[in-house]
Image (cartoon, rainbow, N blue to C red):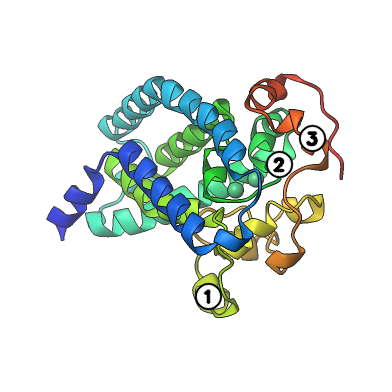
Amino acid sequence: MEELFQKLISVNTDILMLSLLTFFFTVEQIINRASLPPNRIPHLLHGIPLFVGYLILNFGLAFMVVFCVNWIVENQIGLFNQIQIPYVFKIIIGVFCLDFVSYWFHRGYHTFSVLWRLHRVHHSDTTMDSSTFLRFHPLDWFLDNSSVLVACFIFGLDLNIVVFNFILYLPLFIMHHSLFVFPAWFDRTFGKIIVSPNFHKVHHHQNQEFTDTNYGNIFIFWDKLFGTYKTLPVSEIKYGLTEFDTTERQSFWFLLKSPFINIKRNE
Ligand SMILES: [Zn+2]
Ligand SMILES: [Zn+2]
């Protein structure tokens, strides 16, 4: 078991990310051939440079996260460093803790206008497919890394748990944005525990009443517990933000500079 865990966390996450993305994008192309969005390729091409921005920034970010988490471990900071529990429990509870903190960070991106300026790049997407995964402002990833550091600091988590959580979340993260509409039975069963793709799509509705719901990454508990859970049939969802709904505002260059431009949020 421990050997399997070690093998899993030694996977190169950048290669895994690109492999999963290529896989989902290709399957969407084959299965959804009749209903592919007409702007699928330009959509992909505007997302790629944003992701390249992340990869460049990630050289520095990865170094910062590794340094800080190792410092936390060496100095025995955080809840789990004060109590003796088997490592396997620490891994399982650690995944919940990372997801819990990321839920509150995500709520924060929607609450504080300075953070929303970065995060709205992801929400501005009027077309939803697996390549929406690429549509994040490079500085938005900086916020996500801050969420990981806060969780490690409070709960005393190590790098292995952080990497394990990321590998667990990654396929779900890409599926959240895929073109596939998952059947109702999927939501009824798995949706009791995880954030199903249909739930995350509600989070991408243009209407703020729905945008400000379903913040969870892996688990749906937090939304249900803190009153931010909402459902809506995928066929009734209109993606994006009306203030970004022009060809010019969907371009890479506009998205990159958009956090530094005053754009009124239409509700
Ligand atoms: Zn969001
Ligand atoms: Zn999303």
Q: Can you say whether 26 is above or below 45 in the image?
A: below
Q: Can you say whether 90 is above or below 231 in the image?
A: above
Label 2's element?
A: helix
Q: Residue 200's spot in the image, x, y percent?
A: 61, 57
The quarter of the picture showing ligand 1: top right
Outermost residue toward the front in this view? 34
**135 with respect to 262 (left or right):** left
Q: Nearer the viewer, residue 56 or 220?
A: 56
Report which residue position mark 3 lands on.
246
Q: Can you say whether 141 is above or below 32 in the image?
A: above
Instruction: Report the Cα–Cα distance between label 1 and label 2.
Output: 28 Å
Report which residue position mark 1 lands on.
186
Report which residue position mark 2 lands on.
110
Identify the residue at image location x=75%, y=33%: 247
Circle 1: residue type: Phe
**72 with respect to 203 (left or right):** left
Q: Nearer the viewer, residue 182 or 114?
A: 182
Label 1's element?
A: helix
Label 3's element?
A: loop
